[in-house]
Image (cartoon, rainbow, N blue to C red):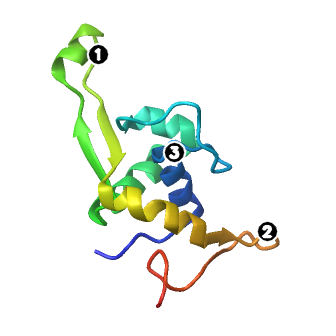
């Protein structure tokens, strides 16, 4: 599948999965594992109806993988298992390049991309 379109929402989710804040600066903690859905929703301020279809598109593109939390961890905390999302090697390699290539024009709020990166024409 082709690389995902770098919409503002996609950029927000990729920054969160890369362990960066909204300005692209690395947070104090480095992500060693994925983030679960509610955590991602809170970090990105995206509603579930936007977030989860976006995560599925990133998964289909090979940029994100999903996995379930271990049963014993959830049981110890007395709650259902969480589904986690993390970047694949492909996503970790391409996401920073795609984020660097994508820009939002301040006057219009529209997205522009430089050709050759993030699925643009070479």
> Residue 3 occupies which quadrant of the picture?
bottom left
The residue drawn where x is 48% and y is 47% is 18
- CA neighbours of label 2 inside 10 A, class few (<14), some (14 to 19), many (20+): few
Vertical comparison of 10 with 116: above or below: above
Name the side, left or right, on which 32 lies relative to 113. Answer: left
Please provide percent x and percent y for residue 40. Answer: 47, 39
The residue drawn where x is 29% and y is 15% is 79
The residue drawn where x is 49% and y is 84% is 116
Return the mark for residue 11: none
Please provide percent x and percent y for residue 95. Answer: 46, 61
Determine whether the residue tagged by mark 1 lies in a helix, strand or loop: loop
Mark 1 and mark 2: span between their CA atoms? 43 Å
Q: Nearer the viewer, mark 3 or mark 1?
A: 3
Please provide percent x and percent y for residue 82. Answer: 29, 29
Residue topped by disc 1: 79
Residue topped by disc 2: 106
Return the mark for residue 16: 3
Q: Earlier in the sequence, mark 1 or mark 2?
A: 1
As drawn, the residue found furthest toward the left would be 71
> Residue 44 occupies which quadrant of the picture?
top right
Please provide percent x and percent y for residue 20. Answer: 57, 44
Q: Earlier in the sequence, mark 3 or mark 1?
A: 3
Label 1 with label 2: CB-CB less than 8 Å:
no
Determine whether the residue tagged by mark 3 lies in a helix, strand or loop: helix
Name the side, left or right, on which 1 lies relative to 26. Answer: left
Q: Nearer the viewer, residue 25 or 83?
A: 25
Mark 3 and mark 1: span between their CA atoms? 24 Å
The residue drawn where x is 25% and y is 25% is 81
Mark 2 and mark 3: span between their CA atoms? 22 Å
- CA neighbours of label 3 inside 10 A, class few (<14), some (14 to 19), many (20+): many
């Amino acid at each position: 599948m082709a690389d995902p379109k770098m919409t503002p929402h996609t950029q927000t989710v990729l920054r969160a999965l890369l362990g960066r804040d909204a300005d692209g600066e690395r947070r104090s903690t480095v992500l060693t594992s994925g983030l679960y859905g509610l955590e991602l929703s809170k970090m990105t301020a995206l509603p579930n109806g936007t977030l989860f279809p976006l995560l599925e598109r990133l998964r289909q593109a090979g940029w994100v993988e999903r996995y379930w939390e271990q049963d014993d961890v959830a049981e110890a905390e007395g709650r259902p298992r969480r589904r986690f999302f993390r970047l694949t090697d492909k996503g970790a390699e391409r996401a920073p390049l795609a984020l660097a290539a994508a820009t939002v024009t301040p006057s219009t709020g529209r997205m522009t991309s430089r050709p050759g990166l993030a699925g643009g024409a070479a």
